[in-house]
Amino acid sequence: MAQPRDYITMQALARIEYKLDLIMANLGIAQAAPPEEPWLAEVRSEIRSGRKIQAIKVYREHTGLGLKEAKDAVERMEKGY
């Protein structure tokens, strides 16, 4: 399970990545997709199969996030963000 400090660090990194994405988009720089972790493919498969709860469970197992954070992340993935 991730410690609160780890979660704060992950959130800070997510904000930085988001800002960099905006800057790159504004400058017209195309991004290469980073390699995907195998467990993320499993999460996406569960989402496509309509098994959202299982997708959240897999996400939590691999990130150590709490239920709400994992649910929010899976829902963002579901929407394509």
Image: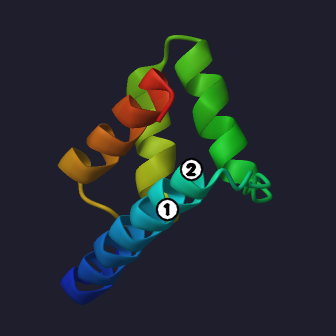
Image position of 37 with respect to 45: above or below: below
What residue does disc 1 label? 23
Image position of 48 with respect to 60: above or below: above
Residue 9 located left or right of residue 48 = left
Q: Tag 1: residue type?
A: Ile
Image position of 64 with respect to 31: above or below: below
Residue furthest out toward the top = 50
Residue at point 52% right, 58% down? Answer: 21
Task: Say whether marks 2 and 1 touch (CB < 8 Å).
Answer: yes
Colour mode of the rendering: rainbow
Q: Tag 2: residue type?
A: Ala
Q: Nearer the viewer, residue 75 or 65?
A: 75
Within 10 Å of the Cα at label 2, are there few (<14), some (14-19), or many (20+) other Cα atoms? Answer: few
Residue 58 x, y percent position in the rendering: 51, 45
Residue 4 located left or right of residue 11 = left
Residue at point 72% right, 57% down? Answer: 37
Residue at point 42% right, 43% down? Answer: 57
Secondary element under disc 1, as helix, strand or loop, is helix
Residue 23 x, y percent position in the rendering: 49, 62
Q: Quadrant of the N terminus?
A: bottom left
Residue at point 58% right, 37% down? Answer: 43
Residue 78 x, y percent position in the rendering: 46, 24
Image position of 60 with respect to 14: above or below: above
Residue 17 located left or right of residue 65 = right
Within 10 Å of the Cα at label 1, are there few (<14), some (14-19), or many (20+) other Cα atoms? Answer: few
What residue does disc 2 label? 25
Secondary element under disc 2, as helix, strand or loop, is helix
Q: Nearer the viewer, residue 73 or 31?
A: 31
Residue furthest out toward the bottom = 5
Name the disc covering residue 8, or none. Answer: none
Residue 35 x, y percent position in the rendering: 80, 58
Q: CA distance from mark 2 to mark 1?
A: 5 Å
